[in-house]
Amino acid sequence: VKPGIISPSVFQWSDGHPVRMFREVADAWEKQEGVYYVSVACGFGYADAPDAGASVIAVTNNDKDLAEKVARHVAGIMWEFKEDLARKPILKTREAVAKALDLVAKGIRPVVLADGSDRTGDNTLVLGELLRKGARNVGHSVLADKSAVKECQRAGLGATVTVKAGGWAPASGEPLTLTGKIVFLGTGDYTKTGPMQQGTTGVCGPTAVLDIGNGNYVILTTFNHQATDDAQFRAYGIDFDKIDIITLRSRVHFRAFYGKVAGAIIEVDAPGLGPADLSVFDYKRLSKDVYPVGANWRKGR
């Protein structure tokens, strides 16, 4: 059963509201005799396809009526909380950065700024705003720009360089001019140590780390990457314990580790290819009845 809702990935955290509640309802059904499995699939919000959006799948012991009853019940709960799943407000770049700086000034640290909209890794808006506001002790993971990495390779470890980085994809802002000392240079691949994907390799490709002053470090990678724990920072020689503000290219996966160690987490709806506000897209193939961006809802249904 499809409840008729499409939502951005940033709202689909399985341990947060409302998805945790959907899972609890599904779990309760799985305890009933004859109900084997109930799956809640929130769907991929950036797919312009007729069947895009959430789904509920119920498996029973050859009892189609029961399966349909279960799936419709869970889908109905999802519909009841469709606003929370699809349209929760998230701070824009300036407001999010201002809040992060205020929290740090009050002694709350580290603060995570999670830029879930950036699916290419080159968005410069959050980092640019932090630097404009004079932020200190920032660890930025990552700015994906193979050209900037190559410039650092030509300069060599320990050199002070000025590079233009990021801003190469649509909606990613303008390239940033960064001046700093190259404190790491080499393969950026490392082993993840946190609860999410523990023991797997974080693939970043050739990587450079710039110390741009005021305790600020920018990780330049060849490939886009989301850091799900502190292992990337430590692998590159960055003192993670001294970072006040951590900027991540992540929507949900970072929470398994950072939910336990961060003083605060701030989701940022910066412009990008994966924004929280799906209304910025012009869906052509999506079913007209899908909330909140199907054609019928756009007309004020």
Image: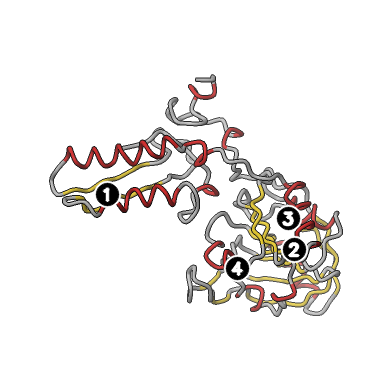
Q: Nearer the viewer, mark 2 or mark 3?
A: 3
Marks 4 & 3, CB-CB < 8 Å contact:
no
Q: Earlier in the sequence, mark 1 or mark 3?
A: 1
Quadrant location of residue 53?
A: top left
Dot 4 amino acid type:
Cys
Tell me the residue at 49%/42% (across/down): 85
Q: Which residue is mark 2?
A: 148
Marks 2 & 3, CB-CB < 8 Å contact:
yes
x and y, in percent, of residue 202 in the image: 55, 70
Dot 3 alpha-carbon crowd within 10 angstroms: few under 14, some 14 to 19, many 20 or more = many
Q: Earlier in the sequence, mark 4 or mark 3?
A: 3
Q: CA distance from mark 4 to mark 1?
A: 42 Å
Q: Which residue is mark 3?
A: 166
Q: Nearer the viewer, mark 1 or mark 2?
A: 1
Q: Which residue is mark 4?
A: 204
Quadrant location of residue 204?
A: bottom right
Tell me the residue at 52%/60% (across/down): 253
Q: Earlier in the sequence, mark 4 or mark 2?
A: 2
User: Element at badge 4?
Assistant: loop
**On the picture, is 53 further left or further right than 283?**
left
Dot 2 alpha-carbon crowd within 10 angstroms: few under 14, some 14 to 19, many 20 or more = many
For this rendering, which residue is in front, 276 or 28? 28
Dot 4 alpha-carbon crowd within 10 angstroms: few under 14, some 14 to 19, many 20 or more = many
Dot 1 alpha-carbon crowd within 10 angstroms: few under 14, some 14 to 19, many 20 or more = many
Q: Nearer the viewer, mark 1 or mark 3?
A: 1
Q: Which residue is mark 1?
A: 29
